[in-house]
Image: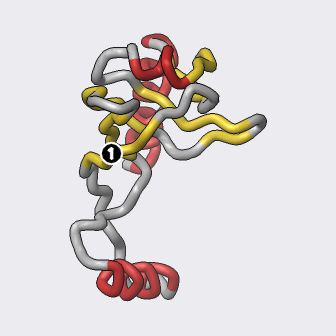
Amino acid sequence: MRIVDGPTFLALPPGTVFSVYKPAYTSGLLIKGETTKYRNYWSADLTYPDTEQDDAGWIDLAQRMEQGEDSGPIHFAEDRSIAEESDLFMVYEREDVEALISALSAALAEEG
């Protein structure tokens, strides 16, 4: 893994796996999409539940999930964000992504 600034991140190709980085903290796990004008970029969060519904629908689903009454599917919808020059991103390199895939595969095998 490596940490890069906003301009470096925006120059990375679509398909880059990353987290938004703040000192000693990272957000979710995302896949970078296209970089557009004005420091904008598209990304898909791999850890975010389905948000195709409105806020009220999501709140209702979250409450049912909290009670163990429902489960929400992961949804890889793209979202647009802005990368400022001072923003930091933890970028996962190929071997990191391969390690993630291996760990997830092992978890599935254990699950049966």
Q: Residue furthest front?
A: 38
In this rendering, does residue 60 appear at all? yes
Q: Residue at x 58, y 21 (%)?
A: 5
Which one is in front, 39 or 11? 39
Q: Residue at x 25, y 28 (%)?
A: 34
* Direction from residue 5 to residue 64 in the image, left or right: left
Q: Please say if 54 is above or below 35.
A: below
In this rendering, does residue 31 appear at all? no
* Chosen colour scheme: secondary structure
In the rendered image, residue 88, in percent from the top left (x then y), is placed at: 61, 29
Which one is in front, 30 or 82? 82
* Direction from residue 14 to residue 67 in the image, left or right: right
Which one is in front, 72 or 4? 4
Identify residue type, mark 1: Arg
In the rendered image, residue 31, in percent from the top left (x then y), is placed at: 36, 33
In the rendered image, residue 52, in percent from the top left (x then y), is placed at: 22, 67
* Direction from residue 95 to residue 51 in the image, left or right: left
In the rendered image, residue 110, in percent from the top left (x then y), is placed at: 46, 43
Q: Please say if 45 is above or below 71.
A: above
Q: Residue at x 27, y 30 (%)?
A: 36
The residue identified by callout 1 is 80
Q: Quadrant of the N terminus?
A: top right
Q: Please say if 64 is above or below 77.
A: below
Q: Residue at x 47, y 20 (%)?
A: 9
Tell me the quarter of the picture where residue 40 sits: top left
